[in-house]
Image: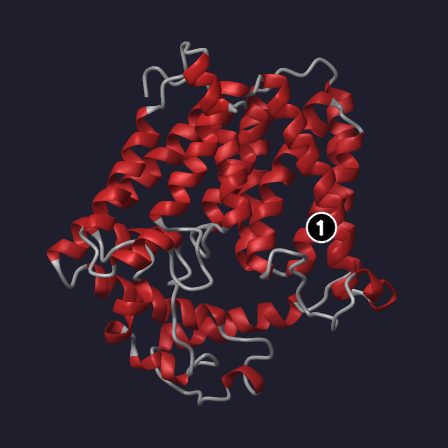
């Protein structure tokens, strides 16, 4: 309908901001230079959220949204996403608690993922919505958003995602520093009461449902000891003997070190990358021996668990700079109610990567800044 409208009733359309054009251009160049062009075009098997075709699709959705939707339309869409988070939470309850297992119909999980396939992906998605809920409740006194915050923080907690909780801490610090100092609020006493309500929710849930977090903290200390000593003192059954859950920090340190070696191994890879989604093809010869002594010793690693390093490895320096510029553009121009979620998203990418649902939500936020990007 949008295309037919342009043909039948041509009119003025919004200009695509420079940040998006640059991002798509650098991805296109990296794809053209990729030795595995089909993978770069369509994505690595089972992971299609970082290919050129995918970003052309979401940028097309962006272009339609920015020209068709009004500011009220965007708010309604995001409210629908907020309501949708309640249904995601219901699936999460069924995955974690025995009485609610009928909601999901599967085996109980130590870490919930709802319908998003993996706990870290669920945490990243729900964090963007949580940032909106927190802002609306604290500064606009939207009481329904306290319920959304409860649902979303409970969901986040049950993922036991270190990347998600790190993004949450960044979001909280951002609100404390920026909004408590700069945000104009007529009724400060009301703001303090709402902050107290948020604090109670944030503290009570972890105390009542500690879950596997105690074991994850134990793993963090074990990982730190391994990395600092730089000595391999564990064997292939690390995940079931010394580390009670897994050894994520130890694995990430090996992945990041090998990825850096991959990046600097060739001028073409350094500048333009190996091609979108081609990391699993190239990383194997840079894989550190230490990973053979982790709990994932028999894995073929297809992600470095750091989206910035991944983008540099696959799209080169020009690609990672264009992505950072896109995030800067979004964070600078988006409305204040969305800034916390964008920041949390950026932080979680230090330890993970965006998936389809999160990417669509992020590009929807990009479309909300129409008419505000002439100088970028």
At 70% from the left and 52% from the top, the residue drawn is 155
Residue at (78%, 23%) from the top-left corner?
190
Dot 1 crowding, Cα within 10 Å, few <14, some 14–19, many 20+: some
Looking at the image, is 307 positioned above or below residue 127?
below
Q: Which residue is tagged 1? A: 88
- For the point 78% across and 44% down, which residue is it? 200
Visible in this render: residue 371? Answer: no
Q: Is residue 231 left or right of residue 157?
A: left
Going by the image, does 98 lie left or right of 321? right
Figure quadrant of residue 283: bottom left
Please tell me which residue lies in front, 305 or 38: 38
Whole-percent x and y of residue 247? 49, 74
**Label 1 element class:** helix
The quadrant of the rendering that contains the C terminus is top left
Residue drawn at the location 52% of the way across and 69% of the way down: 220
Q: Is residue 194 above or below residue 261?
A: above
The total of numbered circles placed on residues is 1
Rendered location of residue 309, percent (x, y): 32, 55
Q: Estimate the x, y position of residue 317 in percent, counting from the top left.
A: 22, 47
């Amino acid at each position: 309908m949008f295309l037919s409208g342009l043909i039948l009733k041509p009119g003025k359309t919004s200009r695509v901001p420079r940040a998006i054009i640059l991002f798509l251009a650098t991805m296109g160049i990296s794809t053209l230079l990729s030795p595995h062009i089909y993978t770069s075009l369509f994505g690595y098997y089972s992971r299609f959220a970082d290919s050129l075709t995918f970003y052309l699709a979401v940028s097309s959705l962006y272009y339609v949204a920015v020209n068709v939707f009004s500011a009220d339309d965007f708010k309604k869409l995001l409210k629908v996403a907020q309501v949708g988070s309640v249904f995601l939470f219901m699936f999460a309850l069924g995955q974690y608690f025995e009485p609610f297992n009928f909601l999901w119909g599967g085996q109980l999980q130590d870490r919930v993922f709802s319908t998003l396939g993996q706990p870290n992906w669920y945490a990243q998605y729900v964090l963007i919505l949580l940032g909106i809920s927190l802002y609306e409740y604290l500064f606009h006194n939207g009481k329904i958003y306290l319920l959304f915050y409860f649902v979303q923080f409970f969901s986040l907690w049950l993922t036991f995602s270190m990347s998600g909780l790190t993004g949450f801490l960044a979001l909280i610090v951002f609100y404390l520093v920026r909004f408590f100092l700069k945000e104009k609020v007529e009724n400060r006493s009301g703001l303090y009461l709402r902050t107290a309500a948020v604090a109670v929710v944030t503290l009570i849930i972890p105390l009542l449902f500690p879950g596997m977090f105690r074991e994850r903290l134990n793993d963090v200390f074990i990982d730190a000891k391994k990395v600092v000593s730089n000595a391999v003192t564990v064997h292939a059954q690390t995940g079931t003997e010394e580390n009670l859950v897994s050894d994520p920090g130890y694995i990430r340190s090996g992945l990041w070190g090998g990825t850096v070696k991959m990046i600097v191994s060739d001028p073409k890879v350094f500048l333009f990358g190996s091609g979108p989604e081609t990391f699993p093809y190239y990383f194997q010869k840079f894989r550190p021996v230490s990973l053979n002594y982790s709990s994932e010793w028999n894995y073929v690693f297809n992600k470095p668990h750091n989206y910035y390093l991944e983008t540099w490895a696959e799209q080169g320096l020009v690609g990672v700079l264009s992505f950072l510029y896109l995030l800067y553009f979004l964070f600078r121009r988006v409305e204040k109610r969305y800034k916390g979620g964008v920041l949390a998203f950026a932080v979680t990418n230090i330890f993970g990567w965006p998936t389809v649902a999160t990417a669509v939500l992020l590009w929807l936020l990009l479309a909300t800044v129409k008419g505000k990007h002439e100088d970028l």
